[in-house]
Image (cartoon, helix red, strand yellow):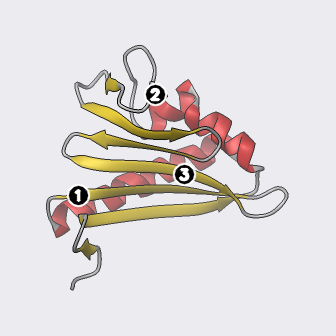
């Protein structure tokens, strides 16, 4: 099976980075309005935290929150894909931030999303790490 293709979730891509910050600081940013705007785009009325709640970005993308665990992860549909953003502790003052998207249509879409998530990660790091 080609890299990035799974039996259950189709094509997928994940990008992660260890940051020199406590996990709660990374979560507070990534789940807050400025962080959400970086990885999801502006969300009309803010990103809901209730499972099953619908959202719409200012760019017209709609989806539904599939899971929201404060301090840990948010999982949601994004168009026809599923997106997860997770933060985990990697030591006393380190955290791993992960973006994972699955149910992508093709290897080409996987590569486009890889470039997208790498760019998002660069922007998040620029905001968080002096």
From the viewer's perspective, is residue 87 above or below residue 69? below
From the viewer's perspective, is residue 56 above or below residue 88? above
Q: Residue 123, percent across and down?
A: 53, 45
Q: Residue 10, percent across and down?
A: 21, 66
Q: Which residue is mark 3?
A: 86
Q: Earlier in the sequence, mark 1 or mark 3?
A: 3
User: Of tags 2 and 3, which is closer to the observer?
Assistant: 2
Q: Is residue 29 left or right of residue 79?
A: right
From the viewer's perspective, is residue 67 above or below residue 15? above
Query: CB atoms at circles 2 and 3 under 8 Å apart?
Result: no
Q: Residue 39, percent across and down?
A: 44, 40
Query: CB atoms at circles 1 and 2 under 8 Å apart?
Result: no
Residue 120, numbered label: none
Label 3 crowding class (10 Å Cα cut-off): few <14, some 14-19, many 20+? many
Q: Which residue is mark 1?
A: 103
Q: Which residue is mark 2?
A: 50
Residue situated furthest left in the rendering: 105
| Residue 50 visible in rendering | yes
Residue in the picture at 61% in, 49% down: 125
Question: Residue 91 appears in which quarter of the rendering?
Answer: bottom right
Residue situated furthest front in the rendering: 51
The C terminus sits in image quarter? top right
Residue in the picture at 41% in, 63% down: 14
Look at the numbered disc 2 and give the secondary structure of its residue.
loop
């Amino acid at each position: 099976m080609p890299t990035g293709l799974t039996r259950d979730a189709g094509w997928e891509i994940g990008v992660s980075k260890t940051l020199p910050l406590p996990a709660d600081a990374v979560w507070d940013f990534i789940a807050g309005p400025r962080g959400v705007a970086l990885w999801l785009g502006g969300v009309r009325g803010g990103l809901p935290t209730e499972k099953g709640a619908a959202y719409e970005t200012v760019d017209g993308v709609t989806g539904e929150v599939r899971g929201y665990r404060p301090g840990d992860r948010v999982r949601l549909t994004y168009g026809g894909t599923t997106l997860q953003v997770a933060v985990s502790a990697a030591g006393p003052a380190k955290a791993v931030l992960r973006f994972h998207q699955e149910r992508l249509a093709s290897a080409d879409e996987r590569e486009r999303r890889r470039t997208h998530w790498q760019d998002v990660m660069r922007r998040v790091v620029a905001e968080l790490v002096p």
